[in-house]
Amino acid sequence: MEIEGQNIIQRMVTATHALRILLPYLNPTLKSLALGYFWQALLAAAITFKTPALDSPPLTDLNMAWDDIFILACQSTDDHVLKLVYTCYEESKVSIDSDRYKMAAYKKAIGEI
């Protein structure tokens, strides 16, 4: 995936986190609008940049503690690395698929994505 596509996907991950934090403060009408526009943007990004299929095979368990991923991320001079790693960590705490967030954070911290 090209750099532009990576940046858009990273923004969608951080937007997911931001929306989850903001939703409890919105009235029902704004909540409905926000979710509708968010899903339109998310689906457009997924289609445009050929994201993995929803039924893709599970990831191999990453035997690394979050603290170790944070240490790797702090070595980067790119603030997007810290932002994505933090967002993945926060979202992993509420996701049924937390291993994917952990793997994405690790890959970003080591510069694979």
Image (cartoon, helix red, strand yellow):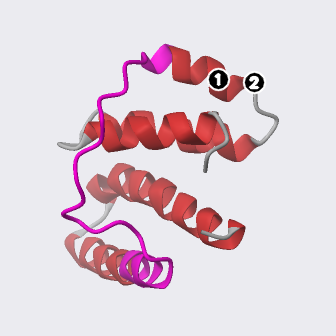
Query: 41 or 52, which is in the foreground?
Result: 52
Is the magenta region chiefly helix, strand or loop?
Answer: loop
Q: Residue at x 68, y 47 (%)?
A: 80
Q: What stretch is highlighted in magenta?
A: 41-67
Mark 2 in CB contact with mark 1 (< 8 angstroms) = yes
Q: Element under label 1? A: helix
Relative to 111, does residue 63 appear above or below in the rendering? above
Relative to 5, does residue 89 appear above or below in the rendering? above
How many callouts does the rendering have?
2
Q: Residue at x 35, y 66 (%)?
A: 52
Q: Which residue is drawn at 75% across and 24% down?
A: 75
Image disc number at residue 48: none
How far across and down, in percent of the image, does residue 88 sit? 44, 41
Q: Mark 2 points at which residue?
A: 75
Q: Residue type at mark 2: give it.
A: Gln
User: In what quadrant of the picture does the N terminus appear?
Assistant: bottom right
Left or right of 107? Residue 44 is left
Residue 22 in the magenta stretch? The answer is no
Query: 14 or 59, which is in the foreground?
Result: 59
Relative to 15, does residue 90 appear above or below in the rendering? above
Left or right of 11? Residue 111 is right
Q: Mark 1 points at which residue?
A: 72
Q: Residue type at mark 1: give it.
A: Leu
How far across and down, in percent of the image, does residue 89 sit? 42, 33
Q: In the rendered image, is residue 86 in sight? A: no
Q: Distance between the residues labelled 2 and 1?
A: 5 Å
Q: In which quarter of the image is residue 66?
A: top left
